[in-house]
Image (spheres, rainbow, N blue to C red):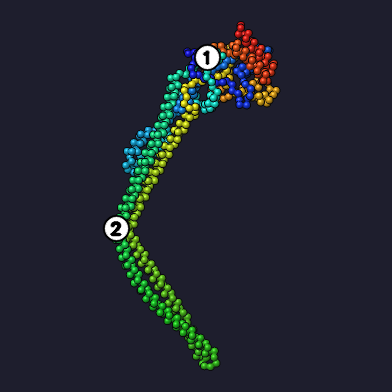
């Protein structure tokens, strides 16, 4: 098992544990940092509930500044972040596309005829609906958590070149080997290359499909023009013959209608002459009747004779009126019969013309039917092609979304050399009997003095918790993975415990002195009370005594 603490490394950088906020005016020294961590760690130590229950206090074994290794690896103009201990990994899911070559071959082999090409498109309607089974590509050590990357990018502006050796920190060695990192980078590059190739292949296939469909549609439109030309010639040849036949029919029926019209007109003339005679007779009788009435009413003449004559006239009038009515009805009947006869002749004429036009209309209908069928073929090809290309476009979009994931797992920093960056944190170990407990204190931001005003009267631990706040939830969660590794890997626990004890702020004299000075600074800035200062000085003395013994 390799040693998990760093012995020596070149081109290393380290980040600060505590970063003052922009509004903080006073310095926050390393001594204050250690003192604040001691205060917070001590407050989290479990104490016995009462003397009656006689429960023992939890023992604080060490509090040590630890450096966690993070690799920054240049990748295509950006930077990949690798976990130096290899605790993290990222899995990408690659979806293989259908066999493009098979599809293209089918298109090319069946593009010569509309029937074969349409059948091919129909068969392959859903060829691009689904990807093949997903492939899992696991990149060992790659940190791809977006929140971590965003926070870490900001954090990197504060990094400084690391010293050759640290005696006041436990520096964890990067156990993720170059070979593993190179494998991960190659996996990403291959995956990106495959995805780019997939997009290019689908887009080229889309172009082939659209081009082939356009070519086939052009051919069909050519067939439509040929059909129009063919039937146009045939129809033009038929036109003179049909027109001649129609003229003959019209001439024949014009004669028949003229002849029948003449016969009916003669009958009407006779009836009309008779009608005129009857009307004249009626007027004459009415005149005589009027004269008889006049003579009868005069005192001169033979009244009886005129009365008898008037009587005879009155008997004739109803008979004459009846004859006139009969004559009118006969004239109307003849007019109606003439109209019906002419209409019948016209209908027969139109029927014969329709028969004569039948050949012409049959050719016209055949032409329209073939053209309509060709247009339906064009519409079908367009619909099938649109359906397939829409599915292909969706697949390309899915691939582009997958490619965009590469942007989320990389950090834009430009072209740089490979760098090893250490993230500082504090690790505390508590013991109570056989039970051990580890707590990680992640990199923090340091609040300003305004917090004191807001928290006037609050307990010291509340103030210190407000003073030091984790700068990144994602980074805190990442570093807390270390606890599980320590608890589940005895060899790693042994290595890190030995290194942590040697660099513990409780056990190294120089660090204890620094902690005491830091406590004094915290008291001077009113973060802790004088009583708390004295209590923690006493605590440091107890730890000093424990070391001596």
Q: Which residue is mark 1?
A: 165
Residue corresponding to mark 2: 237
Expressed as whole percent of the image width and height from the top left, the position of residue 12 reads 50, 19
Please indicate, yes or no, whether residue 341 appears anywhere in the rendered image: yes
Residue at 40 percent of width and 35 percent of height: 202
* Relative to 95, residue 159 above or below: above
The residue lying at 34 percent from left, 36 percent from top is 105
User: Residue 87: where, in percent of width, then height?
Assistant: 50, 20
Give the image location of residue 386, x and y in percent: 41, 41
Classify mark 1: residues with Cα within 10 Å, few (<14), some (14-19) or many (20+): few
The residue nearer to you, when weighing 359 against 492, is: 492
Q: Earlier in the sequence, mark 2 or mark 1?
A: 1
In-front residue for pair 415/120: 415
Query: Going 33% across and 38% down the picture, which residue do you hit?
Result: 108
Q: Are marks 2 and 1 in contact (CB under 8 Å)?
A: no
In this rendering, the label closer to the viewer, 2 or 1: 1
SS class, disc 1: loop
Question: Disc 2 on helix, strand or loop?
Answer: helix
All told, the count of numbered labels is 2
| Quadrant of the image occupied by residue 132 | top left
Q: Quadrant of the C terminus?
A: top right
Corner quadrant of residue 465: top right
Mark 2–mark 1 distance (CA, rounded to whole Å): 106 Å
């Amino acid at each position: 098992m390799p040693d998990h603490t760093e012995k020596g490394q070149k081109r290393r950088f380290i980040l600060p544990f505590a970063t003052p906020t922009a509004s903080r005016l006073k310095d926050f020294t390393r001594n204050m940092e250690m003192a604040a961590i001691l205060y917070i760690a001590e407050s989290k130590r479990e104490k016995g509930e009462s003397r009656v229950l006689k429960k023992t206090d939890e023992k604080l074994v060490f509090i040590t500044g630890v450096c966690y290794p993070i690799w920054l690896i240049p990748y295509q103009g950006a930077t990949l972040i690798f976990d130096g201990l290899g605790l993290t990994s990222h899995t990408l899911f690659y979806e293989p596309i259908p066999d493009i070559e098979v599809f293209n071959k089918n298109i090319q082999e069946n593009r010569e005829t509309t029937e074969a090409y349409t059948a091919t498109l129909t068969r392959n309607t859903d060829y691009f609906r689904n990807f093949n089974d997903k492939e899992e590509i696991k990149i060992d050590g790659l940190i791809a958590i977006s929140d971590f990357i965003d926070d870490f990018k900001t954090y990197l502006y504060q990094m400084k070149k690391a010293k050759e050796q640290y005696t006041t920190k436990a520096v964890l060695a990067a156990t993720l080997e170059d070979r593993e990192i190179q494998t991960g980078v190659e996996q990403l590059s291959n995956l990106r290359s495959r995805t780019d190739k997939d997009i290019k292949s689908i887009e080229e296939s889309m172009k082939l499909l659209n081009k082939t469909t356009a070519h086939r549609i052009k051919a069909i439109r050519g067939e439509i023009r040929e059909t129009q030309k063919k039937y146009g010639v045939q129809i033009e040849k038929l036109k003179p013959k049909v027109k001649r036949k129609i003229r003959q029919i019209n001439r024949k029926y014009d004669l028949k209608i003229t002849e029948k019209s003449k016969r009916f007109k003669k009958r009407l003339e006779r009836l009309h002459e008779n009608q005129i005679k009857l009307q004249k007779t009626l007027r004459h009788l009415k005149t005589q009747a009027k004269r008889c009435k006049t003579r009868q009413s005069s005192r001169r003449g033979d009244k009886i004779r005129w009365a008898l004559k008037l009587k005879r006239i009155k008997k004739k009038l109803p008979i004459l009126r009846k004859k006139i009515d009969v004559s009118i009805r006969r004239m109307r009947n003849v007019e109606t019969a003439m109209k019906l006869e002419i209409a019948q002749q016209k209908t027969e004429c139109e029927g014969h013309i329709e028969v004569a036009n039948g050949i012409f209309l049959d050719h016209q209908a055949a032409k329209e039917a073939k053209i309509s069928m060709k247009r339906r073929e064009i519409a079908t090809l367009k619909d099938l092609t649109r359906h397939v290309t829409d599915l292909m476009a969706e697949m390309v979009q899915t691939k582009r979304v997958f490619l965009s994931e590469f942007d989320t797992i990389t950090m834009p920093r430009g072209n740089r050399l490979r760098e090893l960056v250490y993230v500082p944190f504090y690790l505390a170990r508590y013991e109570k009997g056989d039970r051990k407990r580890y707590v990680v204190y992640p990199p923090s931001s340091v609040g300003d003095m305004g917090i004191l005003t807001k928290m006037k009267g609050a307990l010291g631990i509340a103030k210190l918790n407000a003073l030091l706040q984790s700068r990144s939830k994602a980074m805190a969660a990442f570093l807390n993975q270390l606890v599980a590794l320590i608890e589940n890997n005895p060899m790693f626990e042994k290595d890190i415990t030995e290194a942590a004890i040697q660099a513990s702020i409780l056990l190294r004299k120089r660090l204890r002195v620094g902690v005491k000075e830091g406590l004094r600074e915290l008291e001077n800035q009113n973060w802790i009370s004088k009583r708390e200062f004295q209590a923690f000085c006493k605590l440091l003395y107890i730890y000093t005594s424990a070391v001596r013994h």
